[in-house]
Image (spheres, rainbow, N blue to C red):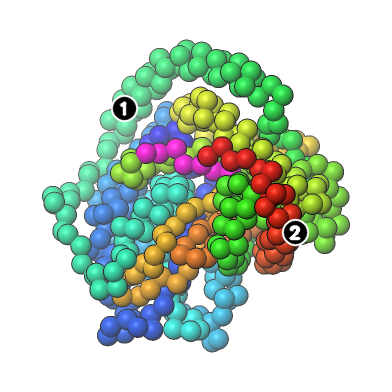
Amino acid sequence: MTGLDASFLYMESPSVSMHTVNLMLLDVSQVPGGYSFARIRRLFERRLHLVPLLRRRIVEVPGDLYHPVWIEDPTLDLSQHLRRTKLAPPGDRRALESLVGEILSTHMSRARPLWEITFVEGLEGDRVALICKVHHAVIDGAAMTTVLERVMSSDRDDHDVAPPTSTWTAEPLPGARQLVLDALRDRLRSLSRLPRLLGRTARAGVQLLQRTRGHKLSLPFAGPRTAFNAPLTPRRSFATVDLPLADMLAIKTLTGCTLNDVVLGVAAGALRRFMDHHGEVHRRPLLASVPVATGGLEDVRLSGNKVSSLLVSLPTDVADPLVRLREIHALTEAAKDAHDHEVGGLLEQWSEYARPWLIQLFMNQVLPRLPRPPVNLVISNVRGARETQYLVGSALDSVYLGGPLLEQIGLNLTVWSYRDTVHLAAVGCPDTIPDPRLLLAECEHALAELVVAVQRAGPAGGRHIQSHE
């Protein structure tokens, strides 16, 4: 297991669960022969070989000498991973979101592969929901698009896939002696690479100072402490909203910024309005961690986490939505420039030296005593398919992705664009944000506000932003 994958295991505590959730709503009204849970289960059985990471489970190294290892689970039983439930009438969206929150609030057993799917029936409008819960140590959010592409199809009638080219054989559980020997060998190898990593880090720091001199650059611990930057409890809440992709693309075109800038601009506007309603003073901008994919080919992406992050200030202290968007664009360009010049890959390399006790000490003892959190929230943006996807003849109607919360960072916003809609999900802790639906309602207002501001500015006013894509 890489240090980055292992770090997501080390971050867990009784109040922090490091899994993601993917909520998919399927329209089963036109399924030939009608919807059947058994048929979808058979599809997962036939296609499991296309996503081999779903067979893997972790094995701890004695004494935590090094990171845990992945093995092919010799006792894999799909009945422990595919579940079925039914909502009471009327089976509305609020009840479904509450169920997702309950599922997010529980840890998964590390004695088997770290994923589970709950099929939810009884929804209004001939819909069936799939709540896919996967530990972040297994996969990152961006790679979930590849998983969906392998399980689903763009053809309604495509129910079969090619069989595996070779027979799968489970790996035997490694013995303690072998685990210790392999751990010591890998530890020595990592220590031999440390001097070179130290030199590269020093050079990257000098280059970063030179390149960012005179430019804005968001730094950790620069944001204020808000109501959602407080100690977490195990409980989680989940909420969703749909926004028109066409409006965001229009803003992108008229201003020359990126779609990700628009997402951050909408989030900043919504957070400003949300904090206004809760009486929080805008003394300084909020600070967001924005995950970015670093992997290449999809087969490499499915071998583990390939993700880094940008730090971007959200100027929630600025009232004008168009000025906010311009500032966000400048800040993201500076963050991407710093990330692309050696800084981005350093996080993954340094994570190889992560130790469970050190991460837990920082999370549980150091962070709560600091005057400000490292960041205020996490905002992710995943680009999904542009054409309708199908699962055993069921059309994928919408898809939402929710990320984990970290200690003192009690809000996660994730966008998944699919077809002509931006599906936005919020994960929060109900003991710090009682109802994240109120924040998502502000996202609708913030987008409308930004559309009006760009239209009023016209082509000349909107194109003050110059894209560096």
Amino acid type, residue under disc 1 in the picture: Asp
Residue at 38%, 80% (x, y): give it: 28
Q: Does residue 374 appear to the left or right of 137 in the view shown?
A: right
Residue at 46%, 65% (x, y): give it: 419
Which structural element holds mark 2?
helix
Amino acid type, residue under disc 2 in the picture: Arg
Q: Quadrant of residue 216?
A: top right
Residue 249, above or below 176? below
Residue to which mark 1 is pinned: 182
Residues drawn in magenta: 290-296
Q: Position of residue 366 (x, y in %)?
A: 69, 34
Res. 22 mark:
none
Nearer to me, 28 or 402? 28
Q: Is residue 446 magenta?
A: no
Is any atom of residue 230 visible in this view?
no
Res. 456 mark:
2
Q: Quadrant of residue 207?
A: top right
Q: Does residue 310 appear to the left or right of 225 in the view shown?
A: left
Circle 1 Cα neighbour tier, 10 Å, few/some/many (<14 / 14–19 / ≥20): some
Q: Position of residue 289 (x, y in %)?
A: 61, 42
Of labels 1 and 2, earlier in sequence is 1
Circle 2 Cα neighbour tier, 10 Å, few/some/many (<14 / 14–19 / ≥20): few
Q: Quadrant of the N terminus?
A: top left
Residue 238, above or below 126? above
Residue at 74%, 35% (x, y): give it: 222
Q: What is the C-alpha distance between the residues marked 1 and 2?
A: 64 Å
Which structural element holds mark 1?
helix
Tally of marks: 2
Nearer to me, 373 or 66? 373
Residue at 81%, 47% (x, y): give it: 317
Q: Is residue 295 magenta?
A: yes
